[in-house]
Structure formats: structure tokens, C-alpha cells
Amino acid sequence: MTHSQFQSQGVAAAPQAQSSAPLELAIVLPTLNEHDNIAPMVRRLEDALGPTGWEAVFVDDNSSDGTAEEARRIAQADPRIRVIQRIGRRGLASAAIEGMCATAAPFVAVMDADHQHDPALLADMLAAVRSGGYDLAYASRFAEGGNADGLSSKGRETGSRVANALARKLTGSELTDAMSGFFLLRSEQLRAQADKLSGIGFKIMLDILATAEPRMKVKEFPLKFATRLSGESKLDHGVILDFVGGLAERWFGRFVPARFVLFGLVGGLGVIVHMSVLAAIYWPDSIGFGWAQAIATMVAMTFNFWLNNLLTYRDKKLAGADGLFWGWLKFCGSCAVGAFANVAVATVLEEQGFVWWGAALVGVAIASVWNYALSSKFVWGR
Ligand code: GDD
Ligand code: MN
């Protein structure tokens, strides 16, 4: 297809790249079902950045509404628009990291594609990092002059403030909005620490600030957080679980993998579920102990599978009837192997003269490590 054919089809939604200014700033826009927001966003970037050499990198997790197609359609007429389409992956933070590592621009910004972030701030943010002596510039909803009006609910706003306060305590930073998803820094600096970032969850800027050495000098810009132009938030349902996971990662991540801690916590809850079910259904004259135990085991395993899928492996979440069914089956298989190892080890130890509860605890510990290893590889591994 020739160039003129594209034009006659009216493909160009954004103006052609006019400037031959050297590439200076990449704007990374993670997307998940943002089809209708793409073209207007490209127009707003053009208005905001004009003659600056810029490119936009849409990092799309294979949206079902054709977001990646839409970005490619615009990119055919405007080479400043780029698309990374990830298959079988999910996650705002990892999408942002991959986008930031995929540019040759010396400065890189991350921003939401749903128009809640105002691209008009980009020029000043760039100036602050390029020549203002700052390492990172970001947009804050809670700085003076900003607002959080665009948050979908009062509960969400309260949650955001609480999360912010916690984050300030944990990182010792003075930021008014550590949860912000709109920031800009030198891409070289980002690449230098990219392998230390967790890639899980939404709190990517916080992670960048926490892993930077020496500490970054940060400039805040007040942001009037707008309402979404089109579509719906992806954060509402998972936001609390995401935050719990993030905290676990911060607190325990240095000693043991955060995933293992979460796996253990879920396992502990599973024991409670198991005992509750057992207590509820076991009645010596009606149902035999073996049956009651089998039912309780199934319920607890299913509960553990569900919670691990939501929390421990939330970045690799299995979905759809098929994915869930096979995942559940493989999870039960892993648990069966773990249970066998548990009984075998504990029995041998007890025979060797170990005190009974010591033998049982070692059995449980071995089974946990075993279950964790098996399920990370076979249930949620890719
Ligand atoms: N590639 C990819 N993968 N993009 C995603 C994913 C994902 O799994 N989840 C969300 N996004 C994209 C959305 O398409 C949107 O462009 C942007 O990330 C923000 O997602 P929203 O779903 O609109 O988040 P929000 O508005 O609820 O959350 C905002 O506030 C948070 C703090 O309260 C965002 O600014 C977050 O960045 C911020 O942490
Ligand atoms: Mn949003």
C-alpha cells in the first residue's frame, strides 16, 4: 500500500511529524483497553510538546478492544508513535519498565493513557530534570494547587491518602503523592536501576525512588487529576490486594522472596479454612472422619488456589474457565505431592526419635517450600 493510499483513506488521526528536532523525550503510556483514548491522547501530546523531539510508546497488554491496532493505525502516518504489544503478560509496572527501556530518548516519562494526567505538565517536568537540577519530576494530586477530583469514589480517595501516608513512613520520603503514575526522569538513570525494580503492581515510581542510589532529588508539580475520558479503571478491584502485596514485598523482600511470604500467609489462612470446615461438617455418627477430612481438604485447596491467584501471583493471574480449571487441577496436584512429602518426612523423623510436634513442623515446612516451588513453576509459571 502506498503512502497516498493511506492519505486517501483518511488514516492520519494525528498530524505528520513536522519537526526534525532530535529525539529528546519518550512518553510511555501503558494501556489496557483504552481504544477510544489513543487518538485524542496523541493530539494532546502534539499540542503540549510541539517542536520538542518526542515519541510516544504505547505498551499494550494485548487489549481485547483493539487498542494496539488503533495505535498502529495512527503510527502508520506518524512515526513518533510506537507500539509494544505484549502477549500473555499483565501489569502496569512491568509495562512501564519495558516501555522506558525501549527508547533511545535521553528523557522518559510515564503517564496514564486515559486522560486523567494532563500532558500540558510535560514541558515543565522536562525542563526541571534537563536543567533544573532535579533527578525526577512528578505530578502530585495532593500538592498545593492540585486535586484528586478524578478519583472514582470517596473510598478510593481515602484509600489513596492512607496508602500515601504508609508509603511515606516506609520510604521516609516527603512526597505528597508517592502513588503517582505520572513522572519523568533520565532514561539512562532508569536503565541503570531497572533490574532492581519489582515490576509487580502499580507503584512503579515509589519503587524507582526506593531503589535509587544515591537518593533522588525530586520536584513536584501540582496535578488536577481529571476524570477518565473513556473506558473504566483497571485498578478499582485489585487495588487493596495490590497494595498488601507491595507492602509485603517492601518488608520481607530483602530476606525471602515476597511471593513466598504471601504463599505462606495464604497457606496459613488455608489451615484455618480447613479446620473450620472440618469442625462444621464432622459429626461422628453422620459423616466419617475420612470423608470430612477429604471435603475440608478440597475446600481449603480451592480457597488457597483462588487467593494465591488473586494475591501471590496477581501479576500472572489465571483467568477464564479453562485457565482456572487447569490451574486449579495442577495446584491440587502440586499440593498432593507436598502432602505426601510432608507425611513421609514427618514419619521418618518421628521414628528417628524427633519430638512429634517438631517432626510435624519440619514436615509442614518442607511441604510449603515444595508446594511453592511446584506451583510457581507449573501452575503460574510461563
Ligand atoms: N499495559 C498495561 N497493563 N496497562 C495497564 C494495566 C496493565 O495491566 N493496568 C492498567 N493499565 C493502564 C491503563 O490502561 C491506563 O492507561 C493506566 O495504566 C492507568 O490505569 P487505570 O486503570 O486508569 O488506573 P487508575 O486511574 O485507577 O489509577 C491511577 O491512580 C493510581 C494511584 O491511585 C493511576 O494514575 C495509577 O498510575 C496510580 O498508581
Ligand atoms: Mn485512570
Image: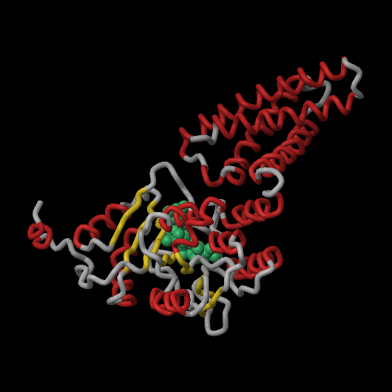
Q: Is residue 263 above or below residue 226?
A: above
Corner quadrant of residue 368: top right
Where is residue 2 drawn, in percent x and y? 9, 54
Q: Is residue 186 above or below residue 96?
A: below
Q: Nearer the viewer, residue 201 or 24?
A: 24
32 lies left or right of 318: left
Specify whether residue 23 is in view: yes
Corner quadrant of residue 162: bottom right
Please tell me which residue is depicted at 71% across the width and 49% down the height of the picture: 252
Where is residue 145 drawn, in percent x and y? 53, 84
253 lies left or right of 345: left
369 lies left or right of 330: right
Please tell me which residue is depicted at 63% across the width and 34% down the height of the picture: 302
Q: How many marks?
A: 0
Please tell me which residue is depicted at 71% across the width and 53% down the height of the picture: 251
Where is residue 92 drawn, in percent x and y? 48, 55
Please tell me which residue is depicted at 71% across the width and 46% down the height of the picture: 255
Where is residue 218 drawn, in percent x and y? 56, 74
Colour pattern of the rendering? secondary structure
Q: Nearer the viewer, residue 29 or 185?
A: 185
Q: Is residue 33 above or below residue 146?
A: above
